[in-house]
Image (cartoon, rainbow, N blue to C red):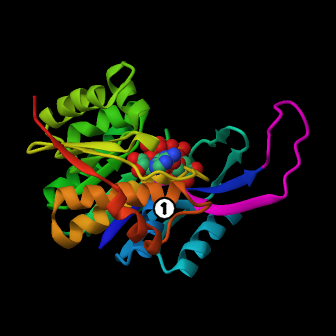
Amino acid sequence: MIYTCTMTPSIDYTTYLPSFQSGELNRTNEVYYYPGGKGINVSRVLQRLGIDTTATGFAGGFTGDYVMDFLKQEGVQTDFIETENITRINVKIKADTESELNGPGPNITEDQFAQLTAKIQTLSTNDWFVLAGSLPNSIKMDDYRRILATCRENNVPFVLDTSGPALKALIQEKPFLIKPNEHELGELFNVTIRSKQDAIIYAKKLVETGIQHVIVSLGSEGAILVSEKQVLAATAPKGQAINTVGAGDSLVSGFLASYVMNHDTSAAFQYGVATGSATAFTTDLCEKKDVIRLVDEVKIETLEWM
Ligand SMILES: Nc1ncnc2c1ncn2[C@@H]1O[C@H](COP(=O)(O)OP(=O)(O)O)[C@@H](O)[C@H]1O
Ligand SMILES: O=P(O)(O)OC[C@H]1O[C@](O)(COP(=O)(O)O)[C@@H](O)[C@@H]1O
């Protein structure tokens, strides 16, 4: 079973309009209310790809109920801890440019966090754990670190997809996989990533610290993957990007969905990039048929470790 943990879920209020005027009244007639948050997106796509998944984390209020009901209706198993705080609503404006407004995370009590920790302690070797999205400030970094250490002690491979100081602190626990985009990778090293070559250089530095797989996603340019054994570059299929929210999460889902079935890193990477692009080409997250259609368009090149 692949467990995803979204500490800070959301409803993604996603709206389309021809152009957006800041400081003016803008009217729009196309609106979607998707359950959001990175772990939740990973679970939603895994379910569509036919992989068993349980979404956990913290959710509360009418928005939290909406998120949990939506997931259940889609067939995603849920095991959330309910909070007094109302789950945030993130605003995604799709006009001539894409703008996003993400709210802060909930206040989590020690007791609520202990309930989550107890769930994670029950995971075992055949399970996977994905910690994804921003992490509430009400919890100390050491407590997050302990969750990942528990996974390691119980031989549960874990994936970390967060950003900023949390990413910097938690990569020390040596995840199986991290998937920064080029900005998140740059942030880790205080540099600007300008090319695939730059991405490879800094991804290698991370692998040298003990992280098993580093995928750096590069939007329409595809992605690179660095592991102890190999450096791979993937092209992204060409198409019209409609909504790239969740594309990175979809890449993670596609990679895991393929990897858990056949343990072939290169095939999993190809499937992951196709899944990311399939999501970028649709309003919501992708369906399996879209991924199957795109997978052969993703070209994988093996590069030399330099
Ligand atoms: N405009 C696009 N065209 C084709 N594929 C895309 C596009 N944007 C994103 N993708 C796909 O989604 C993956 C993740 O996108 P990216 O924007 O890098 O991640 P994140 O959402 O984490 O910032 C890319 O590696 C690529 O496969
Ligand atoms: O937890 P954060 O960093 O605020 O991000 C949450 C947002 O990220 C998303 O999960 C999308 O992530 P990606 O576009 O990086 O795949 C949205 O659904 C959600 O609104």
Residue drawn 49% across the image and 67% down it: 80
Depicted 96 relative to depicted 31: above or below: above
> Viewed as shown, does residue 138 lie left or right of 5?
right
Front residue of 251/62: it is 251
Q: Quadrant of residue 294?
A: bottom left
Callout 1: few (<14), some (14-19), or many (20+) C-alpha neighbours within 10 Å?
A: many
Position of residue 50 measured from the top left corner of the image (x, y, whole percent): 37, 78
For image coordinates 32% across by 68% down, the residue present is 2
- Closest to the observer: 110 or 295? 295
The percent coordinates of residue 18 (x first, y second) are 79, 45
The residues colored magenta run 17-38
Residue 26 located within the stretch drawn in magenta: yes
Residue flagged by tag 1: what amino acid is it? Answer: Ile
Q: Is residue 256 left or right of residue 26?
A: left
At 80% from the left and 38% from the top, the residue drawn is 20
Q: Which residue is mark 1?
A: 40
Horizontal side, residue 176 vs residue 41: left or right: left
Q: Secondary structure at mark 1?
A: helix
Q: Quadrant of the C terminus?
A: top left
Is residue 31 within the magenta segment?
Answer: yes
By secondary structure, the bulk of the magenta-drawn segment is best described as loop
